[in-house]
């Protein structure tokens, strides 16, 4: 069995009085595609934001690629974790090419020339070769999110986190982003995806994790989760999202 | 009485306030004053901005003692009248052995106060940068310094261009206070010239020069603000 690249043990995260994560345990193996589903406010986003320490957990352990992260630790292992945001968060004052090349130059120490070469290659891969000199504001939402994916990939991370990557998109642009993610899934990179796209979860996930109320309620292969949900909360969630 | 007003001829207004001969005679003096004013203003604007940037970063991100010191500095120097500070620096500091030239005293007073105002402007600019930008920079693994220099500050500084320009106008205007410590700035030279010529034309000229210097900047702030509003939509 391949070793877990992410291991969360009894992770608790509170925002003031509100407990967003109630002792979550999760293992993600290298190369695995894990899709996290659940109602709004169930702690899905908090879960992945804890993995790359955009939120610091209050207790429990998070181990990424063999190194514990967070709770005061300064860890370089987090540069191995890439993140794609719901609202893209591209840098508006830089060209698309710069957005993608910045990380490799500043963090990996590449020259601008070789980082831009890498950026061009990745932007071609996400179908944006014609837009490298544009600014983010000149692109559609779907295009911006594909830049976001290229930017994360440019760091050659071991793990890619997706925080509702299609939730801010117009419906007609969801497909182009999911296509890129599906292509990516075939390359062997580890992915943890928080999404409301059940079709994507069904097609691409190795494992689906269902969260509710800050807890992981049920997890398993997509077949089991979607066709034979055991917990009634999962059942009613699926009914709600799939019925229309 | 009525006749008195009627006798006051238009010519005498020209002779008194807008005397061409006096104007031409005193213009070189005024222009040398203008040079001093500009040098002082630009020095204070630059130093004040750099100081403000440092103060804003300390106030937002420094650990406990430094942060408190920055806050205290900003509060104190936003509360003290520049003229009072200038007089303290020029007339009081020599008692502890610190004797500054009029230019040094004026530049210090203006920069110290401008830094406090700039700090609050820059802080507001940094706080106006969306959280997602900080998060994306962090998620990429950029160091705290790189997050600031590559991602946050370029956006924040664009936001603060109008208020910083506005502050710069105020600094330029406040340079006139330096005449109190005998610095030969535009106002001082004008009063000097007035005494020499026994005619107030140089004062009027100085006022016009101030307006001509600053009005384009005032207009510029308006343009900046309009442009920012359009882009923000």
Image (cartoon, rainbow, N blue to C red):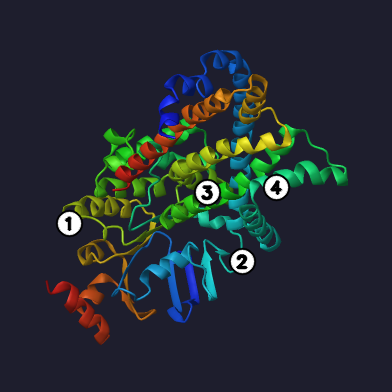
- Disc 3 to disc 1, how far (Cα)? 39 Å
Query: Is disc 4 on the same chain as disc 1?
Result: no
- Disc 2 to disc 1, how far (Cα)? 41 Å
Q: Mark 3, mark 1: which one is toward the viewer?
A: 3
> Where is residue B44, by image quadrant?
top right
For disc 4, the marked residue is B85
Badge 2 or badge 1: first in the primary sequence = 2
Q: Mark 4, mark 3: which one is toward the viewer?
A: 4
Dot 3: chain letter: B
Q: Nearest the camera: B77 or A127? A: B77
Q: Position of residue B75 (x, y in %)?
A: 63, 58
Which label belongs to residue A72? 2
> Residue shown at 27%/85% (left/top)?
A231
Vertical order, B52 against A81 (above or below): above
Dot 1: chain letter: A
Q: Nearest the camera: A139 or A186? A: A139
* SS assignment at label 4: helix
Mark count: 4
Which label belongs to residue B122? 3
Q: Mark 4, mark 2: which one is toward the viewer?
A: 4
> Residue shown at 44%/80% (left/top)?
A19
Vertical order, B32 against A158 (above or below): above
| Mark 3, other Cα within 10 Å: few <14 / some 14–19 / many ≥20 | many
Which label belongs to residue A171? 1
- Disc 4 to disc 2, how far (Cα)? 44 Å
Q: Quadrant of the N terminus of chain B?
A: top left
Query: Is disc 3 on the same chain as disc 4?
Result: yes
* SS assignment at label 1: helix
Q: Nearest the camera: A24 or B216? A: B216
| Mark 1, other Cα within 10 Å: few <14 / some 14–19 / many ≥20 | few
Q: Position of residue B156 (x, y in %)?
A: 47, 46
């Amino acid at each position: 069995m391949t070793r877990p690249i992410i291991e969360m043990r009894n992770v608790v995260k509170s925002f003031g009085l509100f407990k967003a994560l109630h002792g979550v345990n999760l293992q993600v193996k290298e190369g695995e595609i894990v899709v996290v589903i659940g109602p709004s406010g169930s702690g899905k986003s908090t879960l992945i934001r804890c993995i790359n320490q955009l939120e610091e957990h209050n207790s429990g352990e998070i181990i990424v690629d063999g190194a514990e992260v967070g709770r005061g630790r300064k860890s370089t292992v987090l540069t191995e974790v890439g993140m794609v945001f719901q609202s893209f968060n591209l840098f508006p004052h830089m060209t698309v090419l710069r957005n993608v090349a910045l990380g490799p130059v500043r963090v990996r120490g590449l020259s601008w020339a070789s980082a831009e070469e890498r950026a061009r290659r990745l932007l071609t891969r996400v179908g944006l070769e014609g837009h490298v000199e544009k600014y983010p504001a000149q692109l559609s939402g779907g295009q911006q999110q594909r830049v976001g994916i290229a930017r994360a990939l440019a760091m050659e991370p071991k793990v890619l986190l997706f925080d509702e990557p299609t939730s801010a998109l117009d419906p007609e642009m969801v497909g182009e982003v999911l296509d890129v993610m599906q292509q990516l899934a075939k390359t062997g990179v580890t992915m943890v995806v928080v999404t409301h796209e059940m079709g994507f979860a069904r097609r691409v996930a190795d494992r689906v994790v269902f969260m509710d109320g800050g807890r992981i309620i049920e997890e398993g292969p997509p077949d089991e989760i979607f066709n034979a949900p055991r917990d009634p909360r999962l059942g009613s969630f699926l009914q709600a999202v799939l019925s229309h | 009485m009525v006749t008195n007003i009627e006798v006051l001829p238009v010519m005498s207004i020209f002779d008194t306030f807008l005397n061409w001969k006096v104007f031409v005679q005193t213009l070189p003096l005024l222009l040398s004053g203008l040079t001093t004013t500009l040098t002082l203003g630009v020095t204070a604007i630059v130093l004040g901005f750099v100081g403000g940037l440092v103060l804003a970063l300390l106030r937002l991100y420094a650990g406990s003692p430094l942060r408190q010191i920055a806050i205290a500095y900003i509060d104190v120097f936003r509360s003290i009248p520049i003229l009072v500070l200038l007089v303290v620096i020029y007339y009081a500091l020599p008692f502890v052995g610190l004797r500054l030239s009029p230019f040094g005293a004026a530049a210090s007073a203006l920069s110290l106060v401008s830094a406090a105002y700039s700090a609050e402007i820059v802080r507001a600019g940094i706080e106006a940068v969306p959280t997602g930008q900080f998060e994306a920079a962090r998620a990429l693994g950029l160091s705290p310094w790189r997050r600031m220099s590559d991602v946050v500050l370029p956006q924040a500084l664009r936001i603060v261009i109008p208020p910083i320009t506005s502050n710069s106008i105020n600094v330029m205007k406040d340079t006139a206070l330096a005449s109190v410590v005998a610095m030969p700035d535009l106002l001082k030279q004008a009063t000097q010239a007035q005494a020499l010529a026994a005619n107030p034309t140089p004062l009027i000229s100085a006022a016009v020069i101030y307006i001509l210097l600053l009005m384009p900047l005032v207009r510029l702030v308006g343009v900046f603000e309009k442009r920012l509003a359009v882009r923000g939509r």
